[in-house]
Amino acid sequence: MALKEVKPMEPIRTHMQIPRGELIAPGHSACQGCGHFVIVRHLLKAAGPNTIVVNPTGCLEVVTSVFPYTSWRVPWIHVAFENGGAVASGVEAAVKVLQKKGVLPKDERINVVVFAGDGGTVDIGFQSLSGMLERGHKVVYVLLDNEAYMNTGIQRSGSTPFGAWTTTTPVGKRWKGEWRVRKDMIQIAVAHHVPYAATINPAYPVDMYNKMVKALNEDGPSFLHAYSPCPTGWRFDPSLTIEVARLAVQTGYWILYEYDHGQYKVTQPVLKRKPVREFVKIQGRFRHMTEDQIRRLQEIIDEQVEFINKLVGKTVIGPVVES
Amino acid sequence: MSSKLPGWKELPEGAIISDPGNSEVISTGEWRVFKPVIVDEKCTRCRLCWIYCPDDAILEIDDPNAKLGKRYDVDYEHCKGCGICWRECPVNAIEWVPEER
Amino acid sequence: MVRKTRKALTTNYAVAHAAKDSDVDVVAAYPITPSTPAAEKLAEFVANGEMDAEYIHVESEHSAASALVGASAVGARAFTVTASQGLVYMAEVLYIASGLRLPIVLGVASRALSAPLSIWGDMHDIAVLRDAGLIIYFVSSAQEAYDTVIQAFKVAEDPRVHLPAIVDYDGFVMSHVTEPVDVYDKEDVLKYIPKKITWKTLNPKNPVSMGVVGDPDYYYEFKYQQQVAMENALKVAEEADEKFGEMFGHKYGVIETYRMDDAEVAMLAYGAHAGTARVAVDEARKEGIKVGLIRLRLWRPFPTPHLRKALENVSVVGVLDRAFSLGAPRQGPVSLDVMSMYASDPSCAPKLASYTIGIGQRDVRVEDLVAVAKQLKEFSEGKQVPDKTIPIGLRE
Amino acid sequence: MSLVEVRWHGRGGQGAVTASEIVAIAAISEGKYAQAFPSFGVERRGAPVEAYTRISDSPIYVRSKIYTPDIMVVLDPTLLEPRLAQGLKEGGTVIVNTEKSPEEVKKILNREDAKVATVDATKIALETLKRPIVNTAILGAFVKVTGLVSLDSVLEAVKSKVPPRTVEANIEAVKRAYEEVIVP
């Protein structure tokens, strides 16, 4: 039962091996039940203390760094909203050259990790991310996706899903929440010829941890797209954060898969999918949705499932089965 | 209001904080309306409450006298009372009780 | 004395040479006219192994500045070149670089701002950065540009300062002009600016948090610290120049004066056209006009005491600005500074005539500035100085 | 030597800008002060271009374009017209790439006062470089006519500015023009 904890950057078999040491301290002012911290805690454990974190503007940044307090136990920098990729590029380049010149220890691995939100990644930070991925900097870029601009109070982003209410896609006489289909960031990352890209989800900590380990061990940029439920913005009880995250996987809304040097693999097969209705009904942001809208959302998910099944060459995500 | 705060000469250049993780001195326990209470007898040491806590507020304590050599407790200084641990506990070993102050 | 090698270089190339000889660790650059040849030359140095640096081919100027903030935050000596829209695009990040107190150095080949589109030189771009908390040098020759990049690292990295710095040179009129430049050996340059990380850096051995939130209880104090650092920079810049003179034989001062000893009126110029103004002073003197020249070399911090002293015996000063401060009480940015320099004691102020020259690279000829000198004389004899800028070379 | 100002006239692609730089580089290598710069336009192949060189024994401060040159160099005979020589100082020098005689050029320019030297740089370029890039050839004429810089320092400067595989042909072009230029 008492399995030995692993060292940073080594894979684990069960969640019992996750190291105890916390590299992000409590006392931060994130909302109750914030998904970001379940993710960041474990990814930092996987990376270990020899890690520099770049954190563009967003919830994570604001709630961890109000002077004179910081929650970070690793070196951490925030510069602006739209330049996480560029700042990380500079950090990585500087580490490289200073190690070469002997200013920093030559044989000590220093990880560079970006934690950015969906605004800072899929929208305003998109160009800077693209540059970083394309130039091949050895950086792990983690997108903490809570599907809207939560830091400024729930405005839609390019990652807001079909149907979702936000303050800028309100439910009115003409608009009924978001009506477009979100960007596919994994495919965008893959189009940059990165060696490794994967989706992660805090309800699946071992999968999440091991993908981070893989990403860290890549000799080049890697991209992790983390699903991060937001009780405040999605309008659900904070105790349901992990439940919502799990339902996202069980409905096929969030497919856990990876792209590893040209090979796609679904890491969490779902043989019988739950209908998306079950995911929708526990979140206030979808409360207004009509049957037609829910049907449309189900179609979007079905298309995505088909796309992923095609990528992996077999049916690993199965059909919807009503319970 | 700010008479006790340090003046510009005393503050670090560039607002750079050199005391890593010092936010742990901030108590977020008062955010709670309900609080989790771990019932040790029921606890199977599955560790999921510790895994899923966003606030490092589940303490995993080595204790040779405890079942399997360790036990779990709540850091009430930092627990914000989100209830994830209570909701996720597979054996209902966490009670969810109204906060009394 | 140090070893010098004379080369024929444009100012763009001189600036690139200075970065190489300063052993810059990280360059992140994005091409923009007229600074592009400097970015190309830096790439050539790195490609040939003449410069041991990481060259980041960023996808925008915004990312150039951002990458340099990241690099400098780790402790690298960081450098870039840009101009015009590129500098303005960087502006957001440069404010942050200053707030984070990172000693990045930039070469700026000043160019006009759109619209209409102009690839040609003036100083509307640098004027945007005036209040950003960066040290700003104006240089007037390729040699001075080379020397000043090296000096800028000295000042920026000084623990009393820790601010980013810009070495500004006129697009085309300097950036593309081949001139003689003495370059020095890297070893000698590094004796002047040793590689020593004097600022707080991101290092796992001693984790710091950089770029935190400053709420209303704190923000004010940190901004004030930057202001104090700026004030310190004036003295540090003088010291750096002094020491540079001792080592390399070139000394400039934070302002330079020419024939001011017996001057009754003065022109105040900066950048390339200060050279043309100097020739104009000689020409005007031949016609009996007792005019002198003050060349502003350091714009930020503004060398108020030096300028007050230089101007104490003149009755009129004509400030030759290369940008409009649109809608301001005087329409040139340096004119505004000169005006406010006397706000606490207007009794010792000379009359101020604000001129705009070389906008969008309208050529500035010696005779244009001789005419200015003549006009300044008329002002000194009682003619009313207009409130508005006096545009030189503008068609009615 | 007090300040000497040279204005170069050519077409985009002929190398007027490079020629102006080579003269400056040569002068600087001799310990003189010099400036060289193009007319800062958007240069297009075939379009008329100007470039400028200033040489002096003392530091050069003026930064304007050159309006009253001491010397004009015309790299393309089709540019010859009276307007071109406006501003040329009284008794100034004009060096032209042309088959025409100095006298004929003076007439076209309507400047009897000018000292005109001619050289068929196009022919020399075609024979040495096999391409009508006349800038190095005209430099030979420039050295011979003006004596502002030595042939040796110009040849050294040429080596630093032309592609390595064309060095020999370019040097040949300079030397031939140096010999063949018709000096007034």
Image (spheres, coloured by chain):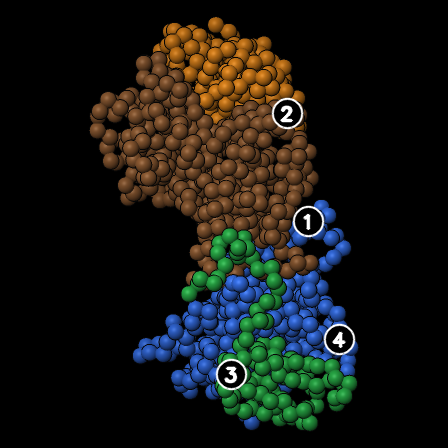
Q: What separation in Å lies between label 1 and label 4 (alpha carbons)?
A: 32 Å
Type of amino acid at the residue the image marks with label 2? Thr
Between the residue at mark 4 and the residue at mark 3, the CA separation in whole angstroms equals 32 Å
Residue ID at (68%, 48%)? A97
On the rendered structure, is A264 left or right of C307?
A: right
Q: Do residues under tags 3 and 2 come within 8 Å of each other at their CB atoms?
A: no
Q: Which chain is brown?
A: C
The tag earlier along the polypeptide, 1 or 4, is: 4
- Secondary structure beneath disc 2? strand
Of all chains in the rendering, the one displayed in blue is A
Q: Which residue is mark 4?
A: A5
The single residue placed furthest to the front in the displayed view is: B4
* Horizontal arrangement in the rendering, residue A292 relative to residue B59 (left or right): left
Q: Colour of chain D?
A: orange
Q: Amino acid at mark 4?
A: Glu
For marks 3 and 1, give the CA distance.
47 Å
The type of residue carrying mark 1 is: Leu
Judge depth for marks 3 and 1 and give the one in front: 3
Give residue B32's mark: 3
Task: Name the image quarter holding residue C264.
Answer: top left
Q: Nearer the viewer, residue A223 or A292?
A: A223
Mark 3 or mark 2, whichever is nearer to me: 3
Q: Colour of chain B?
A: green
| Mark closer to the observer (4, 3) | 3
Q: Nearer the viewer, residue A284 or C194?
A: C194
